[in-house]
């Protein structure tokens, strides 16, 4: 199957040649080899070599390449070949791991097979050389063909060394639509709690990576223990019965269905905030649960509390501020009633603009997608709400087209007009009058024209 590997790009071949001309051995390793076997060679090229980094640097410079010392403590330098960076790392094995993540030391070795043995999954533990072909001591090619993520060696040891691999396994399986091999899967569940030792920021990056595959729903359903360990707040949703006629599954299964629903309704093009909001929209349901005398469950206040919990989770994971803001706004509004009526649409736009200044319109469309996804995660009799939302979308488009005002900035009059017409001094009083005009436009259908608003100012 080696002939299936696309040609190594010339810039990368130059790096191998430079190292081998100086008497060392060099191979392309990791992601490029994996993706090349899958027929997509768009990946960065990483090289490993028998050359100690100082010798590698010298050999690369001698061949006319620029070299940067990007990680010499682990034996890595970066060559720049035809303007493209190629990382070159000395064959190495990891020492003891005492913190569930970083080896206490690395030891440089002379055999590439030892270097491959320290890598996480068989599909990531292959090396390739244009003349010597594929070096695949752990059966990575067969696992690629079978669609399996399998740890190199004993999975329990590998997850014990570095708990981040637990999430990497899920990310790679999600990315390619693979399954996790049985022994690896069992070890995942056993070692998932060790994610508690991993930096929250790294967990956030892996979760963002899993979202980007579009298969977060699969991850939640198939590797639940890992996902709950990554976000411990999800634990309370598992098995949480909603006692509601709208729901036919527990809160966790509903959440997974909404996450999947979001991919369906957006054809896989949701942004990060839409994806996070699908995952966390009901996170506060257990905390807000109450039962009426008929035994029906209610969740008063869960959108607001959910937004607070989401903010806490996402901040600790160092998710970008704009993504957090938008996610929290969507969670806060996910049960906000929106109808086709002009007033309802304008109110929603205004609320969206208040929560995400400058993004109100986009947020309103995202909110309708969250509502669609949410409906798809409920009992079948709720699914028809999606077609009602089509009417709401059309009405929203109409209002946006008609330039419905989102904030006082969009009114046909400004603070100067208020000061002049009302004889007010500049200050907060002016803002309050403008807010009153905005509400007259949104709530009472007063046209947003200069004449109509000036008349209103003179009347009051
Ligand atoms: P991606 O397309 O996500 O970048 P990749 O395979 O290049 O995929 P990297 O995280 O860039 O993944 O790592 C490069 C290689 O280093 C991997 O293919 C794997 O062989 C090895 N590797 C990376 N992280 C680990 C880890 N935590 N434990 C063991 N091996 C790892
Ligand atoms: Mg990479």
Image (cartoon, rainbow, N blue to C red):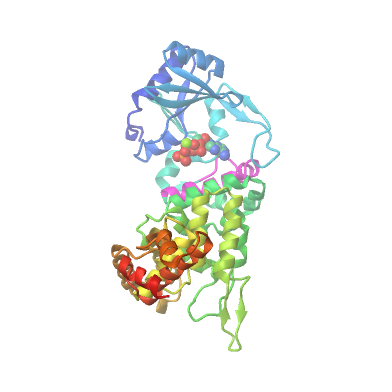
Residue 451 in percent (x, y) is at: 31, 68
- Majority secondary structure in the magenta region: helix
Asked where in the image residue 91 lies, by quadrant, the reply is top right
Q: Is residue 151 above or below residue 404?
A: above
Q: Is residue 240 left or right of residue 351?
A: right
Residue drawn at (62%, 61%) of the image: 233
Asked where in the image residue 368 lies, by quadrant, the reply is bottom left
Residue drawn at (35%, 74%) of the image: 446
Observer able to see residue 238: no
The magenta segment is 150-176
Residue drawn at (47%, 56%) of the image: 273
Observer able to see residue 15: yes
Residue 295 in percent (x, y) is at: 59, 85
Residue 167 covered by magenta stretch: yes
Asked where in the image residue 31 lies, by quadrant, the reply is top left
Q: Quadrant of the C terminus?
A: bottom left
Nearest the viewer among 399 and 28 is 399
Residue 154 covered by magenta stretch: yes
Nearest the viewer among 144 and 435 is 435
Residue drawn at (36%, 68%) of the image: 454
Find the residue positioned furthest to the bottom.
294
Q: Is residue 55 above or below residue 300?
A: above
Residue 426 in percent (x, y) is at: 50, 59
Q: Quadrant of the N terminus?
A: top left
């Amino acid at each position: 199957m080696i002939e299936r590997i696309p040609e190594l790009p010339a810039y990368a071949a130059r790096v191998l040649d430079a190292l081998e001309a100086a008497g060392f051995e060099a191979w392309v390793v990791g992601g490029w080899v994996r993706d090349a076997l899958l027929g997509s060679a768009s990946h960065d090229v990483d090289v490993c070599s028998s050359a100690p980094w100082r010798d590698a640097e010298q050999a690369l410079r001698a061949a006319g390449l620029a070299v940067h010392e990007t990680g010499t403590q682990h034996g890595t330098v970066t060559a720049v070949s035809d303007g493209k960076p190629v990382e070159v790392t000395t064959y190495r094995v990891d020492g003891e791991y005492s913190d569930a993540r970083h080896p206490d030391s690395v030891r440089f070795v002379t055999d590439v097979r030892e270097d491959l043995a320290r890598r996480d999954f068989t599909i990531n533990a292959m090396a390739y050389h244009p003349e010597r072909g594929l070096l695949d001591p752990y059966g990575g090619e067969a696992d690629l063909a079978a669609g399996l993520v399998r740890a190199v060696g004993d999975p329990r040891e590998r997850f014990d060394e570095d708990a981040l691999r637990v999430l990497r396994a899920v990310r790679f399986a999600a990315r390619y639509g693979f399954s996790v091999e049985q022994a690896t899967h069992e070890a995942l569940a056993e070692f998932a709690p060790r994610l508690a030792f991993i930096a929250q920021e790294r967990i956030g990056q892996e979760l963002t990576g899993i979202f980007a595959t579009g298969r977060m729903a699969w991850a939640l359903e198939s590797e639940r223990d890992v996902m709950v360990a990554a976000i411990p707040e999800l634990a309370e949703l598992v098995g949480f019965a909603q006692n509601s006629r709208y729901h036919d599954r527990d809160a966790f299964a509903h959440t997974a269905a909404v996450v999947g629903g979001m991919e369906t309704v957006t054809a896989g093009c949701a942004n990060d905030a839409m994806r996070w909001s699908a995952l966390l929209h009901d996170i506060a349901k257990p905390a807000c649960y109450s039962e009426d005398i008929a035994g029906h469950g209610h969740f008063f206040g869960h959108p607001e509390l959910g937004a607070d919990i989401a903010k806490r989770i996402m901040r600790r994971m160092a998710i970008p501020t704009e993504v957090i803001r938008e996610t929290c706004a969507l969670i806060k509004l996910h049960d906000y009633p929106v109808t086709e009526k002009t007033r309802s649409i304008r109110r929603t736009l205004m609320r969206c603009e208040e929560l995400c200044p400058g993004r109100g319109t986009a947020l309103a469309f995202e909110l309708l997608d969250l509502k669609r996804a949410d409906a798809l995660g409920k009992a079948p009799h709720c699914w028809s709400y999606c077609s009602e939302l089509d009417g709401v979308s059309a009405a929203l488009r109409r209002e946006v087209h008609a330039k419905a005002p989102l904030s006082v900035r969009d009114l046909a009059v400004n603070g100067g007009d208020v000061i002049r017409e009302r004889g007010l001094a500049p200050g907060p009083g002016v803002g309050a009058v403008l807010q009153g005009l905005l509400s007259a436009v949104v709530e009472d259908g007063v046209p947003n024209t200069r004449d109509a608003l000036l008349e209103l100012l003179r009347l009051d």
